[in-house]
Amino acid sequence: MSVSPRPQTVTVVIPHYGDPAPTQALVTRLMADPARTMAGIVVADDASPTPYPASSESAGMVQVVRRESNGGFGANVNTGLAQVRTPLALVLNSDAEITGEQIDALVEAAAPHQPVVAAPQVLNPDGTPQWTGRHFPTVLHQTVEWLIPLARFRHLPVLHEAVGHDVGAARATAPTPVDWVMGAVMLLPLDQVRAVGGFDEDYFMNSEEVDLQLRLRRRGVGSLVVPSVQVAHAQGGSSDPLRRRAWLVDSRFRYARLHGHPRLLRGALTAATGVNWAVNRLRQARGTDVDAAAVRRDEMALIWKGTRR
């Protein structure tokens, strides 16, 4: 008779920057109804303009660590992970709506597959998927995403696949292996993560979790979506959209330099910018409120900035 592996203990790591209220609400919720598998909580403050306040009500369960300078998501998570002494760490964005029961369910579902990077099915507040499971990035994925004419069709499954979303994983009902999982709610096997050096801190925001999971995959550690656990997450609400896009492009070029084809990516995005310009010229001629030249200028600035880093 087979015996299911005993779930390992986990430490929750919450990276903090900005308004402390969401992080405080998450900590309060987890302390009021903690997971059986949870050994503690680490809040990593990334030199936030509004520091996360130290708590005197946590009976030693919550540790706050503070960085001297703002290093971005990966650097901040590394700072939190350095304090973890359990076999597993659960990285949580502060706006993830997760319960102790869900943490236990995620840890237990991942146990037979350990070591593995695992995530629940992450949803928007309206219940639509955030495409937790994804394919490793390719130039084609990023070019399709760049093309303005395709924006109106991106609700279609074929377009989701074309930009790298794993549609099969979003429809699955059993734990499903994927190339990588998004970092909003991410269960990490600590020994394996430390063996590959943790997150690459040269990414400021975006792609750091993809890079980490690719390096783990090369060591034989896969990634898994657990659809029986569903967690709502308010995506991208804490930073300016234009700044987020600049971070995204910068990080994709760094990923391409390390693991892909940066010149091909630059050429493909430049060609896509030409298509966008032509389409926007037609829209502008028909009276649409769009400045084709300005959009092209902004897109080229993002491409060249990412190329030069």
Image (cartoon, rainbow, N blue to C red):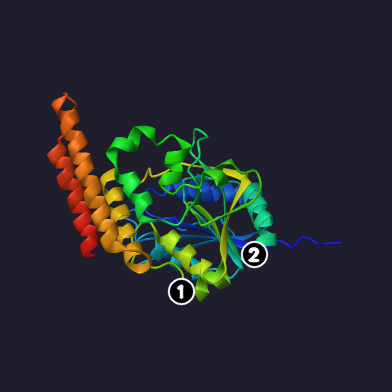
**What secondary structure is marked by label 1?**
loop
Residue wearing tag 1: 197
Image quarter where the N terminus lies is bottom right
Q: Amino acid at mark 1?
A: Gly
Q: Residue furthest top?
A: 287
* Disc 2 residue type (three-letter): Gln
Callout count: 2
Residue 18 visible to the viewer? no
Whether the residues at callouts 2 and 1 have beta carbons within 8 Å, the answer is: no
Sequence-wise, the earlier of marks 2 and 1 is 2
147 and 40: which is toward the camera? 147
Identify the element where label 2 is drawn: loop
Where, by quadrant of the figure, is residue 7 drawn? bottom right
Q: State how far apart marks 2 and 1 are (Cα).
A: 19 Å
The numbered disc on residue 114 is: 2
Q: Report x, y in % for residue 236.
A: 38, 45
In the image, is 207 to the left or to the right of 283? Answer: right
